[in-house]
Amino acid sequence: MQNERYIWTLFVTVLGLSFLVFCSNLTLLTSKQEEDNNICQKYPKNLVGTIYPNLTDTSYKDMEFRFTWVQTGGHHTPTRCKPRERADEKPFNRGKLFNIGYLEAKKDNHTCFVFHDVDLIPENDHILYGCVRSPMHLSRAVNKFNYKLPYKELLGGVAAWKTKEFEQVNGWSNLFVNWGGEDDDLSYRTIANKLSIFRFRNSVARYTMLEHRRTPVNTARHRQLKDSYTRYKIDGLSSLVYESPRIQRYNLFTMVSINT
């Protein structure tokens, strides 16, 4: 019997510990252009900055009640201004699922893609979930690491990509299974293509990491990372093979079910 993996878009969960947020590209305009064209504010006036994550259990029904403004499938379009932004026992292949989610989201004409570990909760509502730059590493400061960046090449946790740069690095590797390695591989692809990694300042890009049971460690990750700088050309979006998924659109998200 085949097993299904799941990808959600917007409030998106990829089987266990990752989710994707897809949106169109962020448009950069002058203040005068924004006012003349009734463009939505970059930072809405109701944002407060530092927030305190509510880590208590919440039912899906309660989430639907709270987020009535989210349209079926997990979409939202402003009405008063113009938007800026046009489980089983098998080994878990996070990178491959992200690649599948990316290609499926492209079919809906999204141009900005936020790859997001679901165990990370933002602590500041000034973190822009859009492609101001690309690649944009959003989770710079995580409580588990004392709100310090472990190393400058880090792209794990939460990162936003535009189509051009993501396809330039050929997406994620399809080879890494279980925990570890795929984030560093993506960093090496980025370096190999001479792309800069952008970040918000440390006081803004703060996240709380939820406690959870980790999947088994990928013991082959160090060996696999040795050829990341060259392997990216043939391993990734260009080599991805998967069956047609089953698409289900709920009020707050879209689920993409993949047979593996």
Image (cartoon, helix red, strand yellow):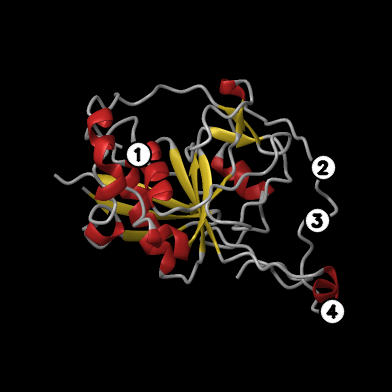
Q: Amino acid at mark 2?
A: Val
Q: Residue at x 38, y 49 (%)?
A: 192
Q: Residues within 10 Å of mark 3 (few under 14, many from 20)?
A: few
Q: Amino acid at mark 4?
A: Asp
- Of circles 3 and 4, the one toward us is 4
Question: Looking at the image, is mark 2 or mark 4 earlier in the sequence?
Answer: 4
Q: Residue at x 53, y 42 (%)?
A: 158
Q: Residues within 10 Å of mark 1 (few under 14, many from 20)?
A: many
The numbered disc on residue 182 is 1
Q: CA distance from mark 2 to mark 4?
A: 26 Å
- Of circles 2 and 4, the one toward us is 4
The numbered disc on residue 170 is none
Tell me: residue 100, above or below residue 229. Answer: below
Quarter in which the N terminus is drawn? top left
Q: Amino acid at mark 3?
A: Pro
Tell me: residue 24, above or below residue 17. Answer: below
User: In the figure, is residue 225 to the left or right of 28?
Assistant: left
Q: Residues within 10 Å of mark 4 (few under 14, many from 20)?
A: few
Q: Do tag 3 and tag 1 residues touch (Cβ < 8 Å)?
A: no
Q: Which of 191 and 210 lies nearest the eye of the viewer?
A: 191
Q: Which of 111 and 189 lies nearest the eye of the viewer?
A: 189
Q: Do tag 1 and tag 2 residues touch (Cβ < 8 Å)?
A: no
Q: Amino acid at mark 1?
A: Glu
Q: How many marks?
A: 4
The numbered disc on residue 44 is 3
Q: CA distance from mark 3 to mark 1?
A: 35 Å
Q: Do tag 2 and tag 3 residues touch (Cβ < 8 Å)?
A: no
Q: CA distance from mark 1 to mark 4?
A: 44 Å
User: SS for tag 2?
Assistant: loop
Where does label 2 land, which residue? 48
